[in-house]
Image (cartoon, grey):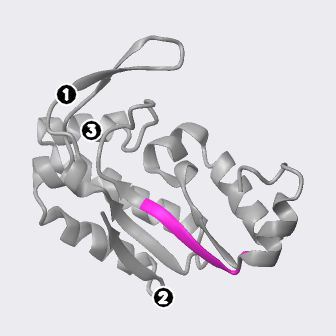
């Protein structure tokens, strides 16, 4: 969808595709930093091009950030996981699932509830942002730090507010 301004893309998309996956701008950390603007713009563009089937990717991308420094889990949630503040983690995680589900109510046919839990970092590392500044990426995750049983809550909360969507576990 980000290529929608490229000549011929709109026509090809409309001709050959009837669905799309909402990617980077739907990730929690990015979504909060961007205040939903890019995600909604991409969703609207996909529908204009004829997308009938939409997939959200992913409600929980289980690591702090990408090597590009794109936030996948918000910094405050990462720190709460690191510090073991489970009440805060529960509140923010459930709140995020309910918020994203409410904002896009009924628009997703499929939802990747989680992605890449097996590659979540276990140690801290430093990345460089686009300006060359050091950015700390913490090696904490729901799976590795809290434990795999936390996904029971994540899937339960997602199902509560998305009763008709197909819920997927991707890795």
In this image, 72 relative to 19: left or right? left
Disc 2, SS: loop
Residue 150, horizontal then vertical, whole percent: 17, 63
User: Upstream in the sequence, badge 2 or badge 1?
Assistant: 1
Which quarter of the figure is the N terminus placed in?
Answer: bottom right
Disc sitting over residue 124 in the figure: 1
Residue 46, horizontal then vertical, whole percent: 73, 66
Frontmost of labels 1 and 3 is: 1
Frontmost of labels 2 and 1 is: 1
Disc sitting over residue 164 in the figure: 2
Which quarter of the figure is the C terminus placed in?
Answer: bottom left
User: Upstream in the sequence, badge 1 or badge 3?
Assistant: 3
The crowd level at tag 1 (other Cα within 10 Å; few <14, some 14-19, many 20+) is few
The crowd level at tag 3 (other Cα within 10 Å; few <14, some 14-19, many 20+) is many
User: Upstream in the sequence, badge 3 or badge 2?
Assistant: 3
Gap between marks 3 and 2, in whole Å? 30 Å
Please report the bounds of the magenta region as a residue range: 50-58
Disc sitting over residue 78 in the figure: 3
Q: Is residue 53 inside the magenta stretch?
A: yes
């Amino acid at each position: 969808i980000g290529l929608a301004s490229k000549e011929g893309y709109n026509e090809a998309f409309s001709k050959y595709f009837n669905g799309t996956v909402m990617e980077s701008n739907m990730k929690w950390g990015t979504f909060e930093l961007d205040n939903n603007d890019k995600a909604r713009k991409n969703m609207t563009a996909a529908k204009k091009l004829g997308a009938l089937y939409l997939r959200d990717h992913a409600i929980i991308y289980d690591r702090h950030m990408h090597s590009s420094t794109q936030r996948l889990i918000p910094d405050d949630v990462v720190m709460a996981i690191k510090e073991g503040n489970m009440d805060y983690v529960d509140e923010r995680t459930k709140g995020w699932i309910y918020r994203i589900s409410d904002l896009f109510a009924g628009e997703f046919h499929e939802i990747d509830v989680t992605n890449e839990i097996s590659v979540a970092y276990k140690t801290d590392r430093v990345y460089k942002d686009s300006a060359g500044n050091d950015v700390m990426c913490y090696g904490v995750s729901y799976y590795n730090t809290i434990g795999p049983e936390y996904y029971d809550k994540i899937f339960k909360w997602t199902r509560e507010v998305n009763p008709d969507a197909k819920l997927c576990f991707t890795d």
